[in-house]
Amino acid sequence: MHFKSLLELLLMVAYLAEDTIAHPPDVIPHTYPPGHDPKAIAKAMANWRPDHGHQIWTLSGLREGDIMDHNPNSRNVIRDSNKLWFNYTVPYVIQPGLTQYERSEVFKGMNLIMQGSCIKFRPYQYYRDRDYIYLRYDEVGCWSYVGRQGGGGQVVSLARNVPEGTCLYHGVVAHELLHAIGFEHMHNNYNRDDYVWIYYNNIRAGEEHNFLKISPQEYTDYGVPYDYDSVMHYGRTAFSGNGGETIVPKDPNAKTGQQEFVSRRDFLKLNTRYPCNFGK
Ligand SMILES: [Zn+2]
C-alpha cells in the first residue's frame, strides 16, 4: 500500500507541469445560498485560530458550514452509486497560481487519503475524463459537494484570501476531498445522540439546521462504530453563538475536531465504499 502511494506521489510529481488549467472545461455552476455574505465570511476566517475549538471550514457559510448543495443540477457516506468516482480515480485540476508551499499542502492532503485506500488522485486528462474536481482558491470559504456530481468539473473551494488559517492546509484539504468522494460529517450521523450531546442553547441563532441528522436511507456508516477521531467530526464549539460548547462527546476521554489525519475508521468506510479488491 505504501509503495503504491509512493508510486502515485511520484506520478503526481511527474505531472506537475500539467495539472493547472486556467479555464478548465464544463465547470458545474454553483450558487451560494440566500444571505451568503462573502465579506463577513472572509473576516471570520481571517480571525480564526486553531485553538478556537472549531475547524476553519465551519465558517464557510454553507450547509453544515462547508457543503455546497445549491447546484441546480444536483440531484456519513453517501449510498448513491451514481456518485461514485470511476475506477477509484478522482481527476483534478488546480487553479494556477498557488505557491509551492500551498501546492505541497494540497498534495499532502491527497496523500493522506491515498496512503490508506485505493483512491487515486491524478491530473485531469481532457481526452479521457469527463468529471473531475476543480481545486479553486479564489472562492469564499473551504467547501465541497458531497460525492461525484457528474457533468464536468465540480469545484472544491480552498480559499486563500485570508492571511492565516486558510483552507490550504493538508487536513482541511483531506476533509474537503472526502466530501467530494462521498462523506458527510460524523456528528450528523443518525446515531450521534448516543455519542455526543448537542447543546442547542449555545448554538448561534439560525444555525440550528447544521445539527440535523442525515437520512440513513441516503447515508450509511457501513456498520463502522461512531468515530470521535474522524477528520469529518466537528470540534466542540462549532456554530457556537456565545463561545460555549455545542458538540460534547459523552466519552470523557474523547477528543474531537482534529484536522490533521484521516482516521482508521474513516478508512474502514472509504475502503468499503471503494473496496480495494473490486474487480480482482
Ligand atoms: Zn465538511
Image: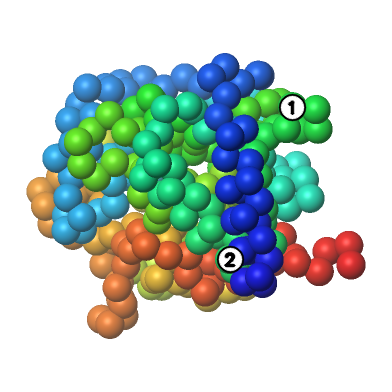
What residue would you read off at disc 1? 126
Q: Which residue is drawn at the image coordinates 62% and 71% (left, top)?
A: 2
Q: Residues within 10 Å of mark 2 (few under 14, many from 20)?
A: many
The reply to whether the residue tagged 1 has its Cβ within 8 angstroms of ligand 1 is no
Q: Is 123 rendered above or below residue 109?
A: above
Which element carries disc 1, helix, strand or loop? loop
Q: Which residue is drawn at the image coordinates 16% and 58% (left, top)?
A: 51
Residue 83, x across and y down, in percent: 70, 43
Which element carries disc 2, helix, strand or loop? loop
Q: Nearer the viewer, residue 22 or 160?
A: 22
What residue would you read off at disc 2? 115
- Look at label 1 and name its amino acid: Tyr
Residue 195 visible in the displayed image: yes
Q: Which residue is drawn at the image coordinates 75% and 67% (left, top)?
A: 276
Residue 185 visible in the displayed image: no
Q: Is 17 rendered above or below residue 83?
A: above
Residue 162, x across and y down, in percent: 23, 33
State how far apart marks 2 and 1 are (Cα).
Answer: 26 Å
